[in-house]
Image (cartoon, rainbow, N blue to C red):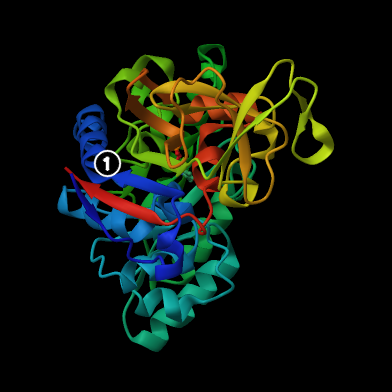
């Protein structure tokens, strides 16, 4: 394996033994899986939140070379970061709340999402200033109640578009609320799809040119279930190797592995405590190892006395409170544990004692959250190293 230097990490960051390794081959593999599920639909990977914590520029470069046709991000700033990194593919900025930066949107060649009159007017102004039309995707609220034109306002928005021919709608999108929930709530997805179809028909009747328009709704869960797959799909988490539905888990490969090292090792006596608040009390003579990774690095404090890590290929429990920069683990039962041993907090490890993996789903269950938050919580203080097999 060739390990590439992190592009964004300052040298001082890259010195620390705590780091995230991103496997670019896993990203390409997951893209192939997603492409297979997508069939004829175009695949636009979602790279918001720094590519789900994997480093958006490196992920985008890898996926662009592997055939991704375009990307989605949440913020204009995220789109600009990708443009500055040399990404040429179309970029959809899904938020729509970009502080009225329409000229920036137009000059940076990114596609905004619109859903109200002020956005149409702002974009039309920028288009006139640039002397060329502006394209945008129109978002419809079919049940998420977050962003998007409401069903009752479709016709007035269509009138607004008709009054501003400088703005061309090339895409129609919605977002699903329950695609990753258990199958019993799948009626909700079906309802959203029905409303999306209705919205398309009503917009067409109201004069919005809908032929050749790209419609998209599916996130990873919907795509993997084969639901709500229109002309394009917007998978995020699946590309990073986490399946939001159990049945597709085996096909995907986790792209990120977070590792640290044992920097201190001591034996405490029965009855001794560990860490802030003395949350852990030894019930026996205990080998306690310290790792230089804490909640400020993205190791949730919820894992205090609860989570596990891998040392020498074997699981070891986190003991005591996770602190800001460090955590302690119990290696009493890890034969041969020594200073400098690799400690895996997320991902797989093979060692003299066995082989195992800590998945983002496992960490999420311990921390009372979801895999998306586990991945995006790995902070910028943890340098990313990119691996090419
Ligand atoms: C985050 C996001 C996605 C991707 O969701 P995953 O569940 O990670 O696949 C798609 N569309 C929108 C609007 C999003 O915000």
Residue 216 in view in this figure? yes
Give whichever of 73, 373 is nearer the camera.
373
Q: Is residue 6 left or right of residue 13?
A: left
Please state the horizontal and vertical placement of residue 285, each as a whole percent of the image: 68, 20
Residue 209 in view in this figure? no
Look at the numbered disc 1 and give the secondary structure of its residue: helix
In the rendered view of the protein, which quadrant contains the C terminus?
Answer: top left
Image: 293 above or below 348:
below
Image: 336 above or below 104:
above
Q: Is residue 250 left or right of residue 198?
A: left
Please state the horizontal and vertical placement of residue 61, each as a whole percent of the image: 24, 58
Give whichever of 262, 200 is nearer the camera.
262
Q: Residue furthest right?
A: 277
Please state the horizontal and vertical placement of residue 299, each as a whole percent of the image: 59, 41
Q: Circle 1 is placed at which residue position?
A: 27
Q: Residue at x 74, y 15 (%)?
A: 283
Give whichever of 77, 372 is nearer the camera.
372
Q: Is residue 270 left or right of residue 188?
A: right
Please state the horizontal and vertical placement of residue 258, each as a whole percent of the image: 43, 41
Q: Residue furthest top?
A: 184
């Amino acid at each position: 394996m060739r390990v590439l230097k992190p592009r964004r990490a300052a040298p001082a960051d890259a010195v620390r033994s705590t780091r995230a390794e991103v496997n670019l081959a896993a990203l390409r593999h997951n893209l192939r899986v997603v492409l297979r599920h997508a069939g004829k639909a175009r695949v636009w990977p979602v790279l918001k939140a720094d590519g789900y914590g994997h480093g958006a520029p490196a992920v985008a470069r890898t996926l662009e070379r592997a055939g991704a046709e375009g990307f989605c991000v949440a913020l204009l700033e995220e789109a600009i970061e990708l443009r500055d990194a040399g990404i040429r593919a179309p970029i959809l900025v899904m938020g729509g709340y970009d502080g009225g930066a329409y000229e920036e949107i137009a000059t940076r060649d990114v596609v905004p999402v619109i859903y109200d009159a002020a956005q149409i007017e702002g974009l039309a102004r920028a288009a006139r200033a640039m002397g060329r039309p502006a394209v945008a995707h129109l978002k419809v609220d079919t049940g998420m109640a977050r962003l998007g034109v409401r069903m009752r306002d479709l016709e007035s928005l269509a009138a607004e578009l008709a009054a501003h021919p400088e703005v061309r709608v090339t895409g129609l999108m919605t977002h699903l609320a329950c695609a990753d929930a258990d199958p019993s709530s799948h009626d909700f997805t079906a309802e959203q799809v029905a409303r999306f179809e209705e919205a398309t028909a009503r917009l067409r009747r109201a004069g919005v040119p809908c032929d050749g328009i790209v419609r998209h709704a599916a996130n990873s869960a919907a795509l993997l279930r084969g639901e709500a797959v229109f002309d394009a799909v917007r998978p995020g988490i699946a590309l990073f190797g986490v399946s939001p539905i159990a049945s597709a888990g085996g096909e995907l490969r986790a792209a990120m592995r977070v590792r640290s090292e044992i920097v201190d090792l001591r034996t405490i006596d029965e009855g001794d405590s560990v860490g802030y608040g003395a949350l852990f009390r030894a019930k026996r003579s205990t080998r306690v190892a310290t790792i230089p990774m804490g909640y400020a690095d993205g190791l949730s404090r919820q894992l205090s006395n609860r989570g596990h890590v891998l040392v020498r290929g074997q699981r070891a429990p986190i003991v005591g409170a996770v602190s800001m920069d460090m955590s302690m683990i119990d290696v009493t039962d890890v034969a041969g544990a020594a200073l400098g041993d690799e400690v895996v907090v997320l991902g797989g490890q093979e060692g003299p004692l066995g082989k195992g993996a800590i998945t983002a789903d496992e960490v999420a269950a311990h921390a009372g959250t979801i895999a998306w938050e586990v991945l995006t919580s790995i902070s910028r203080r943890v340098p990313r190293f990119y691996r090419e097999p």
